[in-house]
Amino acid sequence: MGLGSIAIETAKRLQPFGSKLSYFNRSRKTKAEEELGLNYLSMEDLCKQCDIISLHLPVALETTGVINQKLLALMKPTALLINTARGELVVQEDLVNALINGQIAGAGLDTMYPEPVTLDNPLLNLPEDYQYKLLFTPHIAGTTRQAFEKMHRTVWANISTVSKGERPINIVNGV
């Protein structure tokens, strides 16, 4: 779901495996369809037909909670959900229910909502008999050299700012 630059790179990496690649995007991308052999489907048909649903959407009003009970119920019981985009895209309680009820086979999540994750998150409290259906990664795939260098500069800028008695930028915990 979504066909931005990350989704296109994902499709390129899947091609050598002989994967049949389909996508949904709010606008069709015929050039990418031709170059990558992509099949355009509605969001509902994508969920009904695909074995793996990989999310590549930004957080917006229309995408928040897009993966919900309605779409999860359309997925194959053997399907996998992959979210490397944003945690807000998935209604986490609905995903828990889909995993427990066997609506989908499993999920791989690189991100959850909120981040940092809280201990009461329903995904962290999946019953033990179903925990094997869920894989978490630490949402660090975007840590490129350029991103690391920017983070490094920001840390040192914040140290300088705090040493002057000023408020640092990018405060996460509201301190």
Image (cartoon, grey):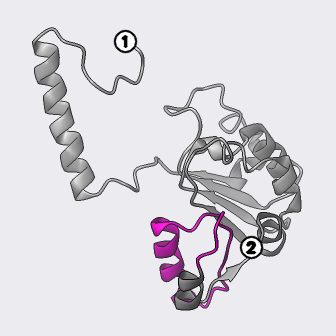
- Residue 75 position by quadrant: bottom right
Label 1's element? loop
Residue corresponding to mark 1? 175
**Is 120 left, or right, of 74 in this rendering?**
left
Residue 106, percent from left and from top? 73, 58
Q: Which disc number belongs to residue 51?
A: 2
Which residue, as the protein is rendered here, is positioned at the far top? 165
Q: Position of residue 146 (x, y in %)?
A: 22, 55
Quarter location, residue 84: bottom right
Give the answer, above or below, for where 35 lies relative to 43: below
**In the image, which is nearer the foreground, mark 1 or mark 2?**
1
Residue 88 placement (x, y as % from top left) = 62, 41
Q: Nearer the viewer, residue 35 or 134?
A: 35
Q: Residue at x 81, y 59 (%)?
A: 104
Q: Are marks 1 and 2 in contact (CB under 8 Å)?
A: no
> In what element is the residue under mark 2?
loop
Structural crowding at the residue carrying mark 2, measured as other residues with C-alpha within 10 Å and reported as few (<14), some (14–19) or many (≥20): some
Mark 1 and mark 2: Cα distance apart in space: 44 Å
What residue range appears in magenta?
1-29
Query: Of marks 1 and 2, which one's residue comes earlier in the chain?
Result: 2
Image quadrant in which the N terminus is located: bottom right
Amino acid bearing label 1 = Val
Near mark 1 (Cα within 10 A), the count class, few <14, some 14-19 or many ≥20, is few
Residue sitting at x 83%, y 50%: 98
